[in-house]
Amino acid sequence: MPLEATPYLLSIDHLLSEDERLTWEATREFCQRRIAPNIEHHYEKATFPRELIPEFGEMGLLGSTLAGYGCMGMNPVAYGLTMIELERQDSGIRSFCSVQSALVMWPIHTYGSEAQKERWLPGMAKGELIGCFGLTEPNAGSDPGSMRTHAKQDGPGGDFVISGQKFWITNSPLADVCLVWAKTLEHGSDTPVIRGFLVPRESKGLSTPETKGKLSMRASVTGEIVLDEVRVPADAMLPKISGLKGPLSCLTQARYGIGWGVLGAAMDVYERARRYTLERVQFDRPIASFQLTQQKLVELHNEIGKGLLLAYHFGRLKQEGKLTPVQVSILKRDNVSMALQAARTARSMLGGNGIMGEFHIMRHLCNLETVFTYEGTHEIHTLAIGRAITGLGAFG
């Protein structure tokens, strides 16, 4: 693994192709050079480094798994390796790329019309256009089917008028286009169905106020999507998907990237804790020489290795078209939980210094508290896996 001066006894290097290794190394070099020097500043000031967005595009980090329209066409393992390096710097940076790629570009590419693809994807791949994904509402989080946002069509083939509010939306204050999921009545039916709509920034009645006061994900821009009778043409609707499967399939793509990305945060806190305990002297010896410290380091090291092997295994399944949503739940649930515990353990190993920004661990810890609950809480993924292995639903 490309990790200088830090031994990892569990490696996947021998399992990677040359292209995958080069992608991993290039992404890490870029992140170390362009993100690392200023990320703590952005976290403290609660700002996002917008100047890097075109560089993400140049590196092929936006819509990287898609084919055509200026996208790189990476395989799922190479994509996962890029997520590791983005989140090694900060979960907010990985979240930006995840939302752009998996939650907006992927559904346009998969469910959109050719005109929609041509309009949005090339600019989004370059970082010239930014998208956001509007599903969560103030009263509809883990139960997205209870959303209240609705779209009413002015007769067959007419415009849609959308009203509602979305909450906790990454990138919304920056977005040029909002992918909004809303309930609408299909003509001839009395049962509302969920459809996706591409709502441009300039749409009258659309606002995206920023969410202030966050103590986590501070280097990520979060906001709302407020739709006050926003009128969009009929061709703004994604034509190739209807029902809850639409947004949930997008979340499956994003959760896959999270399952890889959090390994980067775990690696960073482990490496910092290892380095610190080798340098920190107490009782005339490095604290890394004490049994309890070594136990903690061994547990961090081994859990990261197992998480990496799990991600790699599921990545190859995805490459073969065999990865299931419940397997993605396993990946997201287990690796996020592991990374969060790694950050808590590493923080304790640094004592009081663990809360200081210059050591970066507390920033990762705060971010991972959010990753633990977004895009499916730990509990919801637990129940999804439980349903798969028992055949019994326990959600209600």
Image (cartoon, rainbow, N blue to C red):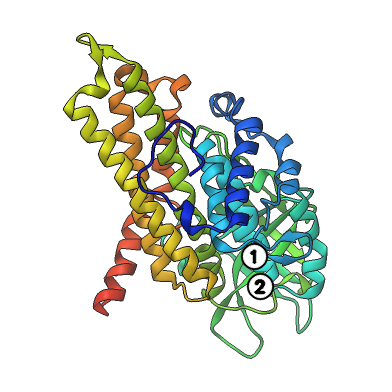
**On the image, which quarter does residue 55 sit in?**
top right
**On the image, which quarter does residue 346 sit in?**
top left
Residue 262 has which mark? none
**Residue drawn 61% across the image and 75% down it:** 184
Query: Does the CB distance between marks 1 and 2 fall below 8 Å?
Result: yes
Residue 59 image point, x, y percent = 71, 47
* Mark 2 element type: helix
Amino acid type, mark 2: Thr
Q: In the visual, does 176 lie left or right of 356?
A: right
Q: Considering depth in this image, is 144 or 50 the residue closer to the camera?
A: 50
**Residue drawn 78% across the image and 56% down it:** 203
Q: Compared to 339, does 242 lie above or below?
A: below
Residue that label 2 marks:
110
Amino acid type, mark 1: Trp
Residue 334 image point, x, y percent = 34, 55
Residue that label 1 marks:
106
Q: Compared to 221, does 252 lie above or below?
A: below
**Residue drawn 49% across the image and 67% down it:** 316
